[in-house]
Image: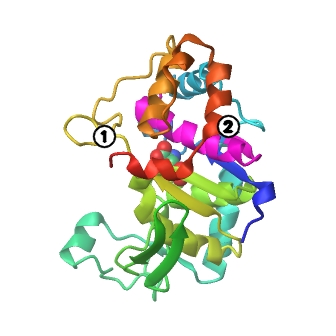
Amino acid sequence: MNDLHNYRGRFAPSPTGPLHFGSLVTALASYLEAKSLGGQWLIRIEDIDPLREPPAATSQILNSLDVHGLFPDAPVLFQSRRHGAYHAAIEHLLSKGLAYRCSCSRKQLQANHGRHPQHCREVDAVTPGQPFAIRFALHDEQCYWQDQLLGPQHQIVRAEIDDPVILRKEGFFAYQLAVVVDDIEQGITDVVRGSDLLDMTAQQLQIYQALEATPPRWLHIPVIVNDQGQKLSKQNHAPALNDHTPVENLFNALNALHQKPPDSLLGGSVENLLKWACEHWERDAIHLTSR
Ligand code: GLU
């Protein structure tokens, strides 16, 4: 178990667009959890998918975090500069037989009920020149872990059918691998993120074990939804945060996290609001947030 005194948390946005209210809530929750425990808080830009990343998104996100007073305790890490580390991790997993090459198309897998027609896990059936993905070979199908907010979790991973891609056919590294390699590199002890990623956790736990690293504690907060009950996201056209009203945005984010900020904070500064929020942070109140 990680040492609480060395708490290191992080916010790790994918720069698919500017920050919206839902991402501010996640950033703020991870920041307050770290700061209220006397820990460090880092920022990592998960820019591993250039096809989904508008060129201005990274600077917009970093500027928004800045305007909202959410300053990291170490330089920002960019996944686009970490390819060497991901390569090394993949080589390690391949050499231990914990990952395999697979050239199956989505169609082929679907037609075969998700099972690899060429038994990719057992036989390396990739022919030279053929594009292939690399998949992590999941093991224990029953996974148990503890969420800091939601309590004991039990997940069944469907090995082989769900073996996650860690290097995509197009040559891009995949989220499941990069997030684990970088949380290890940055010494992250505690991950606070949206509950839309809850289902990813069991797979990530297995990747930690395969890389012989200590997993962090996880805390999943309810995602913020729009009037139609959909997660706020770029795909659902969530509006960008208005960086001219940071105090109001943070105040609303605290309310969304059920922290009951007093109205008097609205007339003050960002620093003042964050100071209040740190001193009054109540993790268990988040439970009341709508899912
Ligand atoms: N980059 C991911 C996202 O923006 C979050 C990764 C994580 O917190 O594990 O959804």
Magenta-tinted stretch: 16-42
Q: What secondary structure is found at the residue carrying circle 1?
A: loop
Residue at the location (54% across, 45% down)? 48
Q: Which residue is mark 1?
A: 225
Residues 240 and 278: in front is: 278
Q: CA distance from mark 1 to mark 2?
A: 27 Å
Residue at the location (22% across, 34% down)? 227
Asked which quadrant contains residue 78, the reply is: top right
* Residue 166 included in the magenta stretch of the image: no
Left or right? Give the position of 92 relative to 205: right
> Given the image, on which type of amino acid does mark 2 rest?
Glu
Q: Which residue is mark 2?
A: 279
> Given the image, on which type of amino acid does mark 1 rest?
Val
Q: How is the image coloured?
A: rainbow
Q: What secondary structure is found at the residue carrying circle 2?
A: helix
Residue at the location (48% across, 34% down)? 260
* Residue 35 included in the magenta stretch of the image: yes
Tag shown at residue 124: none
Q: Nearer the viewer, mark 1 or mark 2?
A: 2
Residue at the location (43% across, 77% down)? 154
Left or right? Give the position of 228 relative to 140: left
* Quarter of the picture holding the N terminus: bottom right
Residue 59 location in percent, x, y?
Answer: 58, 23
Q: Is residue 75 visible?
A: yes
Left or right? Give the position of 108 relative to 151: left
